[in-house]
Image (cartoon, rainbow, N blue to C red):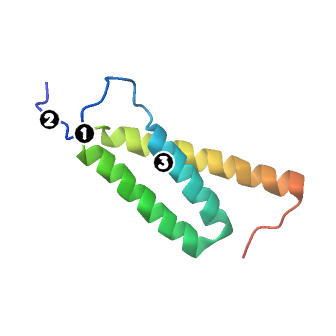
């Protein structure tokens, strides 16, 4: 067993994928699809949040990576639904 001492104590609950990473990356990717510059800033901040959660011992790296994937898929599906039902053209 790994002898890791978390910086923050928390209840031992399921953490795969990271809910925080999923939410923040979904938000960041949604912004990125509309505004590349602002979205890039949000993506960097979201990545820092994910790294901080790993550093604090709240998540494993795979939890964050899976959260990034979930966030991307959710944001992309909403982007496609927006294009289909609201007939919005993608931003240049």
The residue beneath circle 2 is 5
The residue beneath circle 3 is 68
Residue lying at 46% horizontally and 43% vertically, measured from the top left: 20
Residue lying at 48% horizontally and 62% vertically, measured from the top left: 43
Residue lying at 80% horizontally and 54% vertically, measured from the top left: 82
The residue beneath circle 1 is 57
Please tell me whether residue 83 is drawn above or below residue 90 in the rendered image.
Answer: above
Ranked by sequence position, the earlier of labels 1 and 3 is 1
Ranked by sequence position, the earlier of labels 2 and 3 is 2
Residue 5 at x, y = what percent?
14, 35
Q: Which of the two discs, 1 and 3, sits closer to the camera? A: 1
User: Could you tell me which quadrant the C terminus lies in?
Assistant: bottom right
Residue 35 at x, y = what percent?
64, 71
Judge from the rendering whether residue 12 lies leftward or rightward of residue 74; answer left or right.
left
User: Could you tell me which quadrant the N terminus lies in?
Assistant: top left
For mark 3, give the secondary structure: helix
Q: How far apart are marks 2 and 3 (CA)?
A: 25 Å
Residue 15 at x, y = what percent?
39, 30
Judge from the rendering whether residue 29 lies leftward or rightward of residue 63; answer left or right.
right
For mark 1, give the secondary structure: loop
Disc number for residue 83? none
Please tell me whether residue 30 is drawn above or below residue 39 in the rendered image.
Answer: above
Ranked by sequence position, the earlier of labels 2 and 1 is 2
Residue lying at 48% horizontally and 48% vertically, measured from the top left: 68
Q: Which of the two discs, 2 and 3, sits closer to the camera? A: 2
Residue 84 at x, y = what percent?
85, 53
**Cβ–Cβ under 8 Å for marks 2 and 1:** yes
Judge from the rendering whether residue 11 lies leftward or rightward of residue 71; answer left or right.
left
Label 2 Cα crowd, 10 Å radius (few <14 / some 14-19 / many 20+): few
Q: How far apart are marks 2 and 1 (CA)?
A: 7 Å
Q: Distance between the residues labelled 1 and 3?
A: 18 Å
């Amino acid at each position: 067993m790994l002898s890791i001492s978390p910086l923050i104590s928390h209840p031992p609950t399921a953490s795969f994928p990271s809910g925080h990473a999923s939410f923040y990356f979904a938000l960041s990717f949604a912004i990125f699809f509309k505004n590349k510059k602002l979205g890039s800033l949000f993506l960097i901040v979201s990545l820092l949040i994910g790294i901080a959660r790993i550093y604090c011992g709240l998540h494993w790296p795979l939890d964050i990576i899976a959260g990034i994937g979930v966030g991307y898929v959710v944001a992309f599906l909403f982007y496609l639904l927006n294009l289909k039902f609201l007939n919005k053209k993608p931003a240049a």
